[in-house]
Every structure is written in structure tokens, then in C-alpha cells.
Image (spheres, grey):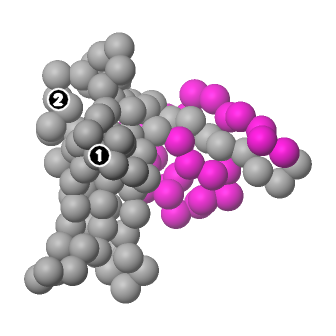
Amino acid sequence: MEQEYEQQLFLKAMVGSRIIGSVRAYEENNTCKVGKLIVHPDYENKGIATRLMSELEARFQHCKRYELYTGFKSERNLYLYDKLGYRKFKTIEVHDHLSFVYLEKYR
């Protein structure tokens, strides 16, 4: 985790001194690789994930492309990413009950 913190940008959403959401990313070959977008369940559906992603994209506005992945059963995540303009470009099957959907967005 400490090594990731040194190599990636971490953004957090807070209420008072409590972290209620976060996302991280790094740049590779002019692509912003987005990872681990999370929002505390008590704060879901309040626009926090959208604001985190918007800020992340602003911080990496020099990148031509954004890429992330999520579980194929993560319907709420897939809905959010679609709403934000991300499109599926590949699916990787890990085993019969687990696949990851990769999404991308171009500037």
C-alpha cells in the first residue's frame, strides 16, 4: 500500500474527519489507469463517486485515454461508468463465476 501511495494519485471524499470515498490512478503510456473507486455504503447515490471521477479526470486531463475495470456483476458500477462516458472494450474471464469488464474513455 505504501508503494502504491508513492506511485499513484489518491483522492478522497470526506465528511468532517471521516473518509467516505476514494479513488486512485496513475499514468501509463498517456493512459490514466483508474483503480479502486469506493464510497461508503451510507453515502452511496449522493454523487460522490461522480465527483471523485470528475476530479480525477481533471487531474489527468493531459491523458488521451482513461481505463478501468470492474466485476461483470457490478451493475451499479457499470451503470455509473456508462453514465460517465466509459465504454466496454474487453472482458477477461477469471473462472466460471468471475469476469472483469474493462472500460475506456477517450478525451
Foreground residue among 36 and 65: 36
Secondary structure type for disc 2: loop
Q: Quadrant of residue 7?
A: top left
Residue 93 position, x and y percent, is 77, 38
Report how far apart the C-alphas of labels 1 and 2 lie in the structure: 20 Å
Foreground residue among 17 and 47: 17
Q: Earlier in the sequence, mark 1 or mark 2?
A: 1
Q: Using the rendered image of the protein, determine whether residue 96 is visible from the camera's viewpoint.
A: yes
Please tell me which residue is depicted at 56% across the width and 36% down the height of the picture: 102
Q: Please state if 16 lies on the left or on the right of 87 as rendered.
A: left
Indicate which disc residue 61 carries.
2
Q: Quadrant of residue 30?
A: top left
> What amino acid is at disc 2?
Gln
Secondary structure type for disc 1: helix
Per the image, the residue denoted by label 1 is 5
Q: Please state if 95 lies on the left or on the right of 41 as rendered.
A: right
Please tell me which residue is depicted at 73% across the width and 45% down the height of the picture: 99
Q: Quadrant of residue 91?
A: top right
Q: Which residues are magenta?
A: 69-95
